[in-house]
Amino acid sequence: MKWHARAARLCHNTPLEGGGVGDAHQVEGDNTNSDWWGWETRPGSTAAEPSGVAIDHVRRYPDDIALLASLGLGVYRFGVEWSRIEPEEGTFDQHWLDHYRSMVETVRGHSMVPMVTLNHFTLPRWVADRGGWLSPDIPRLFERYCRTVAAHLGDGVDRYTTINEPGVVAFGGYLGVLGFPPGIRSVDAWYRSIENLRNAHVLARAAVKEARPEAKVGATHSMAEWEANAAGRPMMEYMRRQMGDVFLDVCGDDDYIGVQMYTRIRIDLPRALAPGAWLMARSGWLRRLALPRVLGAQMAHADRVAGGNPTDMGYEYRPQVIADGISLRGYVHWSAFDNFEWALGYRMHFGLIEVDRATQERLVKPSARFLGELARTGTFEV
Ligand code: BGC
């Protein structure tokens, strides 16, 4: 009964939609023209293993989508891959545009709602060669690609995410904390990538709206519940701003805010460091010296203080946010299938559906049935 009440409260605006997510590079396989592929396979790569054939979703998507639908999930959020669609500057590949159109039709054919992510961490190699998110051209290049995709998918898609977790792209690739390409470690680069990501989102949103005015367009943001002691507070506020608020600032006109919130991050610094921390958070040269090392280590550590019961990633479970009664319109689970977890390779298993990578067999987990039931009925029994 308790859970009926909780579910009903979550759904007070619209019926809760439940679904699963699959990002292109993490599930498709053989995404050879992307910067990530080059990063994983280069000599001396720091990635745990290459993505390889992933879960072969590129060929198995009809069965995969049918499986998600059979479980009762109402939404399938998936990525389209820029490096396939525009393998060379200005050349759009009809085969891949049609491939994604066919994915959309498959989702709709099962009475599910497709939600398309236009960029999820990967870039075409030719964009990376021009500087990736540091290139002054990237907002316009991304805008053109998004316009092309939205025009091609037409009335098949009413929900778009422009960029998945822009804060992670900037922080991971340009401040160099997460082992993401291009592996730059520079506060100036971090700032420039943020600016380009912000501009790219705004241009992409307008381009999609122009091609498909009915579409709901937003971005999805990696957020955390930030906490700090008194000495750590200036640093925490600075980081919260740089990793999240700078993007939310340009999302005021979006149709929705995608919240990807996994844990809390605590920045506790010794009281003796308080003046230094204040300065560090404000002064350019101190940031340059200290941030990539001190803060990266501090955050990684804080993320792993999980009270003895961590998630696969070592995060603390923080479901408490739900108790605030937020207007939750839908829950799309990361991830639909076990898949390629970037620098960590295949050792994470967040999927609703397990994948045996030797045989590519799909095995439904109890969590998939649970979410499917919730999606179908809006309530669930315990
Ligand atoms: C990212 C995914 C990633 C997951 C787990 C998500 O929010 O967008 O690409 O696999 O977090 O780390």
Image (cartoon, rainbow, N blue to C red):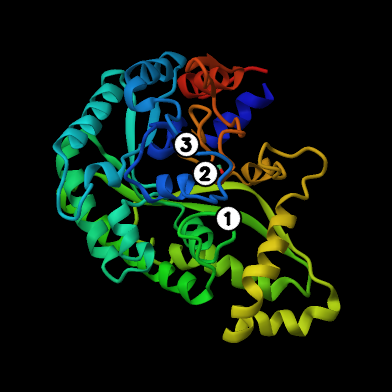
Task: Identify the mark at residue 122; answer none if there is no mark.
Answer: none
Can the viewer see residue 283?
no
Residue 237's image quarter?
bottom right
Task: Identify the mark at residue 178; answer none if there is no mark.
Answer: 1
Q: SS of the residue at dot 1?
A: loop
How many numbered badges does the structure rendering display?
3
What residue appears at the point 23 percent right and 64 percent down from the top-left corner? 140
Can the viewer see residue 337?
yes
Of the 4 image quadrants, the one containing the C terminus is top right
Horizontal side of residue 23 vs 201, given as left or right: right
What residue appears at the point 66 percent right and 76 percent down from the top-left corner? 290
What residue appears at the point 34 percent right and 58 percent down from the top-left corner? 128
* Residue at the disc numbered 3: 51
Q: SS of the residue at dot 2?
A: helix
The crowding category of the residue bearing disc 1, from other C-alpha atoms within 10 Å (few below 14, some 14 to 19, many at least 20), is some
Residue 17's image quarter?
top left
Residue type marked 1:
Leu
Of the 4 image quadrants, the one containing the N terminus is top right
**Label located before the other in sequence (1 or 2):** 1
- Residue 86: horizontal and vertical position, in percent? 22, 47
167 relative to 68, above or below: below
**Label located before the other in sequence (2 or 3):** 3
237 relative to 204, above or below: below
The crowding category of the residue bearing disc 3, from other C-alpha atoms within 10 Å (few below 14, some 14 to 19, many at least 20), is many
- How far apart, in angstroms, are the residues tagged by discs 1 and 2? 9 Å
* Residue at the disc numbered 2: 342
- Residue 87: horizontal and vertical position, in percent? 23, 47
Q: Is mark 2 within 8 Å of ligand 1?
A: yes
Residue type marked 2:
Trp
Residue type marked 3:
Ser
119 relative to 18, above or below: below
Q: Is mark 1 within 8 Å of ligand 1?
A: no
